[in-house]
């Protein structure tokens, strides 16, 4: 169908020409959990009471202020966030009670409410441009997430959306698109980092008229939420990427496979596909070309292994998601035996940028072998958790200290000494320590040290996180998610979990460590798919960098981080004045002593609840 | 007899909506679970004969994916996130507090009065707010053992 994007842009711009101010309330998962929808509704209600000219719809006759919701703005820990344009003011931690003040002062009179601004040290930051968290990033994929209304296709188009898809469909041949993407150096953002252009080209060369395109939105990696934010915040960028990919590979049908836990992403994506179909961007004769493309949204049912291409295909076909050996590759024989390309959400959202910028300009971002930007989900013990985007090759130091604002202690205060490690890439990744602060984060450099970018989760761990426990946590996850096809993955991971449990319970010895290492290598070698091949990574990586901690567990039966309950022991030091409070509080009566004299803990009786330690006013109880 | 008859009505509609398409087994099971709140054995047999598939295949798919449950769920569903970020911020303590509050024994996930079911999920993708708990689709961030007990009380009170 012929559609004139220019006409849509013109209509959209004229519909907002009388709007003076725009108030954008973040409706990403984080902010919604903190009550941003309540804030939005209160703003609307109160503006009516105050007689402020406010609208939630763009129409030519509407003037005054326009209120809209957006996807994730990334600064999750400080939510709910409100962005006021054109002044570029960002208010953080807004409560419904603040609505009146915001409307009266800022919306009506352009007055800044300093109380609601983000404070960086002693500096009051007016908006995104002044907040270090945003300043130090390079947001291109996430640029429009958090500004545009994800449920309004017209706004996406008015911001230059679908121009790249039209160019690809009308002015470029399939080979030209593959070449541009190959030349741009774009590599898959899902984990393995295969060159996207090459992947497309393999499918393109396959004979036959029926081909499929699949978008993998089954982001199961615990600790990662980049894909979710893109799907919720800018769903049309994913659809545009899919249209370009479909044209390049010759696919006329596609699926977007989304994790069932991401209900908002499913809802927004369904809406976006419907809007794009209604407007004529999806369906027969896309943009009036001879290219057809039909798109379906499919909800997953909870299986991490679907991150593996062949497993995902089985799941779309309605079967158990068990991976199958490659070759044949999905590009040769994928969904229902037809050539199929599978790309990750972030990869697809990057594609329109490449078509718009051109390969050369895109290559300038990032490093020689890892071009472009990468989004990371930054969590754990840092001042500002949230969603960030940086060029490939950025150092860990820049991310942790400049963007995230530094490492925090358990009370949330900045304390650099509290840093222990960064876990990167989730259950398939590894650990980075202080010595890696200046390592450039890209595909090859991380692979060299036994970690991987994975999908991009970055969890900052503190001194109080036991690394053995962390690797046990990941092993618990992978052994649970193993599909059971390969013996080494199914049984090996289970055995490794048992060994790690023994270690954390103080029932292991040095032989256990040797066996653990041996088995980890065997699982790596003997598994068919990425899940099994990378499952031992957390174990091997923690063994490499935190051997001392493992040794303390097996040799001294001690957990240095104080996290493994079964290895803890509480003792009373000479600081004890014999007040008897701990003995009174102890639920199992394991503490005895005479009034006014040093008390003692009967270790076999002690259940390690720690109440003695918290109730002692003289810091006389120590945990070892 | 009548009540038994109507029991299958919903699944018939779901099958029709999906054109009795074998490849749509997962969406069919999802709709069935939404309707019945779990996957009853007799409904699964009904699906397998309607789609001309072996019951083993339907059962195999139903047990493979963690979203599907073969046991009835409680009225209120509490999902506790145990993703990396939540785990690092001590989600285990929240799970313990909840189980204790609801009087759940090991391997038990639903209370006897069928009021609550607790589930641990790998990651809810709200890591910035860790630790996270979802009670009936409402996301609650920066949870503590103390807060969850209060929330459970509130949920009980609201019913």
Image (cartoon, coloured by chain):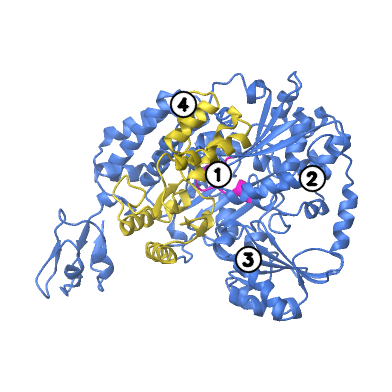
Chain colours: A blue, B yellow
Q: Relative to residue A506, is residue A329 depicted above or below?
A: above
Tell which tag, 3 or 2, sits nearer the viewer. 2
Left or right, A65 with respect to A316, comes to right
Q: Are marks 2 and 1 in contact (CB under 8 Å)?
A: no
**Which quadrant is home to the C terminus of chain A?**
bottom left
Tell me which segment is drawn in magenta. A218-230
Rounded to the nearest angstrom, the CA distance separating label 1 from label 3 is 26 Å
Residue behind mark 2: A278
Rounded to the nearest angstrom, the CA distance separating label 2 from label 1 is 25 Å
Type of secondary structure dominating the magenta stretch: loop
Rounded to the nearest angstrom, the CA distance separating label 4 from label 1 is 24 Å
Q: Residue at x 54, y 54 (%)?
A: B126
Rounded to the nearest angstrom, the CA distance separating label 3 from label 4 is 50 Å
Counting from the top left corner in percent of width and height, residue A169 is at: 84, 35
Residue behind mark 1: A260
Q: Residue at x 70, y 80 (%)?
A: A49
Do the residues at discs 2 and 1 belong to one chain?
yes
């Amino acid at each position: 169908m012929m559609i004139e994007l220019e006409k849509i842009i013109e209509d959209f711009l004229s519909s907002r020409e009388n709007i003076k101010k725009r108030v954008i309330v973040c409706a990403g998962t984080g902010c919604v959990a903190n009550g941003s929808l309540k804030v939005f509704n209160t703003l609307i209600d109160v503006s009516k009471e105050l007689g402020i000219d406010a609208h939630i719809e763009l129409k030519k006759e509407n003037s005054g202020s326009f209120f809209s919701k957006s996807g994730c703005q990334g600064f999750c820990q400080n939510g709910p966030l409100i962005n006021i344009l054109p002044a570029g003011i960002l208010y953080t931690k807004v409560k419904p009670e603040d609505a009146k003040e915001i409307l009266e002062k800022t919306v009506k009179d352009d007055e800044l409410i300093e109380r609601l601004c983000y404070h960086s040290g002693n500096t009051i930051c007016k908006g995104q441009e002044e907040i270090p968290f945003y300043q130090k990033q390079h947001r291109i994929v996430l640029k429009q997430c958090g500004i545009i209304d994800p449920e309004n296709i017209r706004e996406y188009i008015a911001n230059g959306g679908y121009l790249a898809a039209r160019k690809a469909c009308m002015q470029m041949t399939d080979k030209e698109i593959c070449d541009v993407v190959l030349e741009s150096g774009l590599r898959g953002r899902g984990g393995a980092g295969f060159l996207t252009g090459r992947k497309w080209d393999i499918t393109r060369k396959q004979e036959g008229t029926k081909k499929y395109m699949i978008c993998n939105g089954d982001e199961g990696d615990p600790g990662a939420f980049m894909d979710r934010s893109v799907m919720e915040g800018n769903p049309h960028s994913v659809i545009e990427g899919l249209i370009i990919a479909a044209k390049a590979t010759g696919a006329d049908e596609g699926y977007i496979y989304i994790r069932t836990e991401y209900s908002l992403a499913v809802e927004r994506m369904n809406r976006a596909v419907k809007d794009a179909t209604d407007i004529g961007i999806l369906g027969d004769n896309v943009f009036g070309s001879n290219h057809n493309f039909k798109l379906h949204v499919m909800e997953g049912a909870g299986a991490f292994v679907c991150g593996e291409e062949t497993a995902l295909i089985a799941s779309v076909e309605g079967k158990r998601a068990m991976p199958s050996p490659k070759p044949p590759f999905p590009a040769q024989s994928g969904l229902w035996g037809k050539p199929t390309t599978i790309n990750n959400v972030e990869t697809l959202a990057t594609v329109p940028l490449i078509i718009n910028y051109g390969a050369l300009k895109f290559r300038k971002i990032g490093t020689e072998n890892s071009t472009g930007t990468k989004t990371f989900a930054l969590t754990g013990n840092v001042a500002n958790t949230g969603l960030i985007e940086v060029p490939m090759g950025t150092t860990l130091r820049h991310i942790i200290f400049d963007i995230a604002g530094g490492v925090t202690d358990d009370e949330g205060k900045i304390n650099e000494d509290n840093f222990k490690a960064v876990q990167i890439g989730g259950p398939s990744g590894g650990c980075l320590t202080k010595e890696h602060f200046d390592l450039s984060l890209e595909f090859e450099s991380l692979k060299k040290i036994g970690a991987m970018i994975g999908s991009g989760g970055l969890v900052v761990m503190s001194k109080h996180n036991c690394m053995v426990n962390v690797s046990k946590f990941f092993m618990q996850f992978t052994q649970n998610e193993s599909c059971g096809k390969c013996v080494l993955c199914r049984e090996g991971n289970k055995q490794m979990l048992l060994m790690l449990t023994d270690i954390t319970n103080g029932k292991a010895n040095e032989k256990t460590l040797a066996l653990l290492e041996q088995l980890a290598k065997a699982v790596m070698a003997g598994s068919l798919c990425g899940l099994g091949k990378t499952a031992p990574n957390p174990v091997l990586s923690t063994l490499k960098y935190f051997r001392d901690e493992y040794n303390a567990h097996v040799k001294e039966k001690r957990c240095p981080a104080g996290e493994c309950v079964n290895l803890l022991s509480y003792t009373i030091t000479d600081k004890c004045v014999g007040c008897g409070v701990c003995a009174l509080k102890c639920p199992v009566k394991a503490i005895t002593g005479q009034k006014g004299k040093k008390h003692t803990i009967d270790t076999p009786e002690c259940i390690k609840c720690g109440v003695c330690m918290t109730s002692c006013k003289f810091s006389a109880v120590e945990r070892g | 007899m009548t009540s038994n008859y109507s029991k299958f009505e919903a699944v018939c509609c779901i099958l029709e909506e999906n054109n009795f398409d074998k490849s749509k087994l997962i969406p069919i099971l999802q709709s069935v679970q939404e309707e019945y709140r779990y996957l009853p054995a007799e409904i699964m047999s009904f699906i397998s004969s309607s789609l001309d598939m072996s019951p083993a295949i339907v059962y195999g798919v139903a047990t493979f994916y963690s979203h599907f449950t073969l046991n009835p769920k409680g009225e209120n569903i509490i999902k506790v996130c145990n993703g990396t970020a939540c785990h690092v911020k001590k989600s285990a303590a929240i799970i313990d507090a909840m189980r204790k509050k609801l009087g759940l024994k090991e391997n038990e996930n639903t209370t006897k009065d069928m009021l609550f079911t607790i589930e641990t999920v790998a990651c809810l993708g709200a890591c910035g707010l860790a630790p996270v708990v979802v009670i009936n689709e409402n996301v609650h961030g920066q949870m503590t053992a103390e807060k969850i007990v209060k929330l459970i009380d509130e949920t009980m009170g609201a019913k």
